Amino acid sequence: MSDMTVRKIRVLLAKPGLDGHDRGAKVVAHAMREAGMEVIYTGLHQTVASIVNQALQEDVDVIGLSIMSGAHIPICRKLMGLIKEQDMGDKLVAVGGVIPNKDIPTLNEMGVGGVFPGGTHFDEIVKFIREKSKN
């Protein structure tokens, strides 16, 4: 019998910028862990460059951002640019938080794979990551 184990999906969950509210991110991290994913939570006040650097160092499959500040478009634009620069285009990027429906097409055009406005059910996020992560 083979003793091979399936590698867990690795998720880096980050709070970019000055937003000081992380309860939602912590609850999402818990839901992902309960679903069998390995979650690295970076904590509050992360720069986009540090998020990309940590994702590279941790060899994650998914980069998840929790943004409550309303700055999701400039933050995601910068993040996607750095991901491209670092040749990390295979990473799944998901963003959640206070995101108006009118901004979802813009985020998708940038390359953000999943957008989860506040109130999204955790099982929907977990299902999306399982289906879309290249694991």
Image: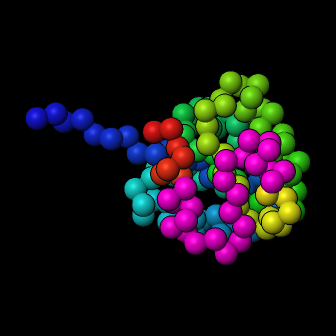
Using the image, determine if residue 87 lies above or below residue 13. Answer: above
Farthest left residue in view: 1
**Region in magenta:** 105-128
The residue sitting at 51% across, 67% down in the picture is 123
Q: Is residue 65 left or right of residue 57?
A: right
User: What kind of colouring is applied to the model shown?
Assistant: rainbow
Q: Position of residue 62 (x, y in %)?
A: 58, 44
Q: Position of residue 115 (x, y in %)?
A: 70, 57
Q: Is residue 3 left or right of residue 9?
A: left
Indicate left or right for 61 with 36 as reference. Answer: right
In the picture shown, does residue 62 fall above or below 20?
Answer: above
Q: In the image, what residue occupies the spot 61% across and 32% down?
A: 90
In the rendered structure, does residue 6 fall within the stretch colored magenta? no
User: Is 3 placed left or right of 72 in the picture?
Assistant: left
Figure quadrant of the N terminus = top left
Residue 87 location (% of width, % of height): 68, 24
- Image x and y of residue 13, in percent: 62, 52
**Nearer to the camera, 25 or 127:** 127
Which residue is at 71% across, 71% downward? 118
- Residue 65 appears anywhere in the view: yes
Q: Residue at x 64, y 71 (%)?
A: 120
Q: Is residue 23 visible?
A: no
Residue 114 belongs to magenta span: yes
Q: Decide: is 97 above or below 108.
A: below
The answer to which image quadrant residue 15 occupies is: bottom right
